[in-house]
């Protein structure tokens, strides 16, 4: 229990320092692009390595058994990829609609302009970093049952998005974190998790903004597909896969 508390405290100390630098230091002295670059360099190459180092050292001192060595890697087939993509896209939209907090980008960030740095970060750097940190380091370091570890690691993953994207994004990312955490604890490799994460960023952020800005009817078509068709199919998929969740509470 004490190790879990130390891990959570260390995690938030690192991210709070990141946000303080981003909003109160870099934003004051640099333009938006340079501020984002400097703050992410600080996060990815200073905060994260230090956090991971101390977590690994703590695991060694406590002689923690590494479950990764005994875990069989699961090779997903193409139909599994399709089912997961539908499931994560549909359920995340449903959760946001239930809480009545998502605008489907119609009034959000439409003036946002994508550039190479933004796309590189959204589609590669962020998925790589976040999956490694949350689904490999944190998830495997929490000393508790599998279900509890998935929920707590997902909560940590979701909570950091509140500062940058608002409270509404916490529900969205929590759902995604639980799905990816479940996959990780059942042997799905990092490459697949990074792919699912990257697709989520593309589907929920890059694609709708692009369609709203550059395609007259693209936004309406996207709303129908993502808000109606995909959620319906997602519940059908979830019903077919319900047996897969029976061992979720195993340790």
Image (tube, rainbow, N blue to C red):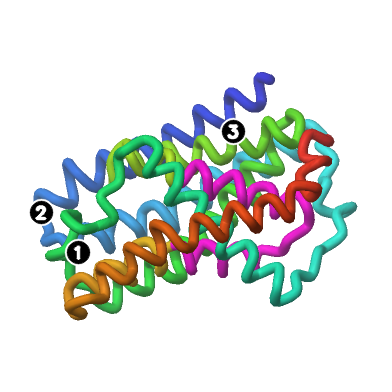
Q: Can I make out residue 186 in this image?
A: yes
Q: Can I make out residue 61 in this image?
A: no
Mark 1 residue crowding within 10 angstroms, few (<14) / some (14–19) / many (20+): few
Of residues 212 and 162, the one drawn nearer to the viewer in this rendering: 212
Q: Earlier in the sequence, mark 2 or mark 3?
A: 2
What residue do we see at 35% from left, 64% from top? 224
By secondary structure, the bulk of the magenta-drawn segment is best described as helix
Mark 3 residue crowding within 10 angstroms, few (<14) / some (14–19) / many (20+): many
**Residue 123 placement, left or right of 22:** right
Give the alpha-carbon distance from disc 2 to disc 3, as whole Å: 36 Å
Quadrant containing the N terminus in the rendered view: top right
Residue 6 vertical placement versus 60 (above, below): above
For label 1, the SS is helix
For label 3, the SS is helix
Q: Is residue 8 magenta?
A: no
The residue singled out by tag 3 in the image is 152
**Residue 2 placement, left or right of 99:** right
Name the spot of residue 193 as percent of width and height, x first.
61, 62
Q: Nearer the viewer, mark 3 or mark 1?
A: 3
Which contiguous range is marked in magenta? 173-200
Name the spot of residue 37 as percent of width and height, x first.
28, 63
The residue singled out by tag 2 in the image is 29
Which of the 4 image quadrants contains residue 75?
bottom right
The residue singled out by tag 1 in the image is 34
Q: Are marks 2 and 3 in contact (CB under 8 Å)?
A: no
Name the spot of residue 221 as percent of width and height, x first.
31, 71
Which of the 4 image quadrants contains residue 188?
bottom right
Q: Nearer the viewer, mark 2 or mark 3?
A: 3
**Residue 112 placement, left or right of 234:** left
Of residues 117 and 106, the one drawn nearer to the viewer in this rendering: 106
């Amino acid at each position: 229990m004490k190790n879990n508390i130390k891990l959570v405290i260390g995690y938030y100390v690192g991210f709070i320092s990141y946000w303080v630098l981003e909003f109160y230091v870099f934003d004051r002295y640099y333009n938006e692009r340079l501020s984002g670059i400097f703050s992410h360099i600080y996060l990815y190459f200073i905060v994260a390595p230090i956090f991971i180092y101390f977590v690994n050292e703590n695991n060694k001192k406590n002689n923690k058994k590494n479950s990764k060595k005994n875990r069989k890697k699961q090779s997903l087939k193409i139909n599994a990829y399709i089912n997961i993509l539908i499931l994560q896209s549909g359920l995340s939209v449903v959760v946001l609609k239930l809480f009545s907090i998502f605008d489907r980008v119609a009034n959000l960030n439409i003036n946002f302009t994508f550039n190479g740095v933004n796309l590189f970060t959204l589609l590669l750097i962020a998925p790589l970093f976040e999956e490694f940190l949350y689904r490999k380091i944190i998830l495997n370091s929490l000393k508790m049952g599998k279900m509890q570890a998935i929920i707590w690691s997902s909560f940590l993953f979701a909570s950091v998005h509140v500062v940058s994207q608002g409270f509404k994004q916490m529900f969205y990312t929590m759902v995604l974190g639980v799905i990816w955490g479940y996959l990780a604890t059942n042997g799905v490799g990092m490459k697949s998790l990074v792919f699912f994460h990257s697709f989520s960023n593309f589907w929920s952020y890059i694609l709708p903004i692009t369609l709203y800005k550059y395609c007259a009817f693209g936004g309406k078509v996207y709303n129908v597909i993502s808000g109606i068709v995909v959620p319906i199919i997602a519940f059908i998929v979830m019903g077919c896969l319900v047996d897969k969740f029976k061992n979720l509470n195993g340790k």
